[in-house]
Amino acid sequence: MKKTVCLLGILALLTASATAGILTNNNQSATFIRLLSRNASLDVDAVYYNPAGLVKLSDGFHLSLHNQMITQDKKIINGFPLLNDPNYLGEVRVPFFPDLYAVYKKGNLAVSFGVGPNAGGGTADFKQGLPSFEIPFSMFPPLLTNMGVPTSAYDVDIAFKGKSVFMGFQLNLSYAVSPSLAFGVGGRLIQATNKYEGSITDVRINPGGNWVSAYDFFMSIGQPIYAAMVADKELNVKQTGSGFTPILSLCFTPNESLAFSLKYEFNTRLELTNKTTVDDTGMFPDGEKFRNDIPAILSAGLRYAITPAFRSYLSFSYYFDKSANWEGAEEFVNHNTYELGLGLEYELSRLVTISGGYLRTQFDLSPYYQDDINHELTSDSVGAGLKLNLTNRLSLELGGLYVFYKKYQKLDSNGMVSDFPVTFNRTTFDAAVGINYRF
């Protein structure tokens, strides 16, 4: 079970989504970034957020292309007293996070297609490694000192870099059974790929005050077990798998001012398989398979036009994390994750619409879940942006998002030291641009 938690956590480390459940990206358009509430969307990004609502589009073919540029820093302060430096930083830079939507609407029927990164989508670089990798080496100086070899320091080069993308290819059929009620049915094919590269090299210690290779030292004193522990290690592995998500949706629009939506995405059964080139860690046996489901999601949305030019949006998304199969890791989820969003937009003129939004993402996870490899943080996000109607058929959307995370602190322990403090924090900024065209 602990190994599965670690693997799930490595995926979390690589994910720089602005808003998400544990494995699901919810930021799927520039419109979302500028409003943070899209569950009752009646625009082209409803392909993802509210498929049934696509019947409210004008007849014809609609195309929408979005990209996000995401910057995230994952910060860890580990108070284990033997570490050289308690501060660790993981940098995630995502210059290309695309979504494409296409809709054909005719009368009461709409057929739509969408593609985008439903999980992952980023590359993480931990240039200093992670505390859980380094702590075992920091314990060698006191170990040797207790063995009668005075040793006061250690040094090690640790690096970990990974890339994760779960691309979703979605197809929907939406139909209006009356002017006020529409249903949608669809599905999403998930193609998942993770790639990990890492190394632990050049472990050194200073017995008697002289820096030497730890491996050479332990071999010279007849300690091959310790020598194996400090030997150089490399990792190069690729994981792949696919799954399918059935999707049902409903949209109720009793009048021009009000729209209500419901959507349910079923649990995605996802099994990943290791293709391992090098694995000196023993964590990724070649050919091993493991479950990494994407949880079911229930979402609801409300759109209300206070005036024809001033619109409000309310969204609620609930992730059934505890019902997913993570081969035991789901047991460390105390309560399922939820998100609550509010967005407002105002048409300054026929050309310019301004908007802003707020989103709360709430996690409730056991302290056993939260460690340097595997942690999620409750957050408050604020977004803003604008829409420019360049012509009657072409519009441009710009948005920016900043996420305020709730710092998580816990007391940790191992076989040598008890109750040392560990703190997790993050910063995230997301800039997005979208183009919509109606043929």
Image (cartoon, rainbow, N blue to C red):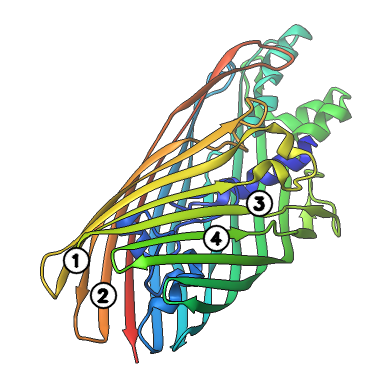
Give the distance between the C-alpha atoms of the residues marked 3 and 1, in whole angstroms: 37 Å
Q: Nearer the viewer, mark 1 or mark 4?
A: 1
Residue 258 visible in the current orientation: yes
Give the distance between the C-alpha atoms of the residues marked 3 and 4, in whole angstroms: 14 Å
Question: CB of mark 1 within 8 Å of CB of mark 4?
Answer: no
The N terminus lies in which quarter of the figure? top right
Q: Nearer the viewer, mark 3 or mark 1?
A: 1
* Number of the label disc, if any, that sits on residue 308: 1
Number of dots carrying numbers: 4
Question: Would you name the residue on which mark 4 appears?
Answer: 263
Give the distance between the C-alpha atoms of the residues marked 1 and 4, in whole angstroms: 26 Å
Please state if 39 lies on the left or on the right of 328 as rendered: left
Of labels 3 and 4, earlier in sequence is: 4
| Residue at x 11%, y 65% (from the top left corner) | 348
Hey, what amino acid is under mark 1? Answer: Pro
Give the distance between the C-alpha atoms of the residues marked 2 and 1, in whole angstroms: 20 Å
Please state if 165 lies on the left or on the right of 397 as rendered: right
* Number of the label disc, if any, that sits on residue 295: 3
Residue 23 higher or lower than 432, as above or below: above
Hey, what amino acid is under mark 4? Answer: Lys
Give the distance between the C-alpha atoms of the residues marked 3 and 2, in whole angstroms: 33 Å
Of labels 1 and 4, earlier in sequence is: 4
Of labels 2 and 1, earlier in sequence is: 1
Question: Would you name the residue on which mark 2 appears?
Answer: 396
| Residue at x 57%, y 77% (from the top left corner) | 172
Residue 365 higher or lower than 91, as above or below: above
Hey, what amino acid is under mark 2? Answer: Leu
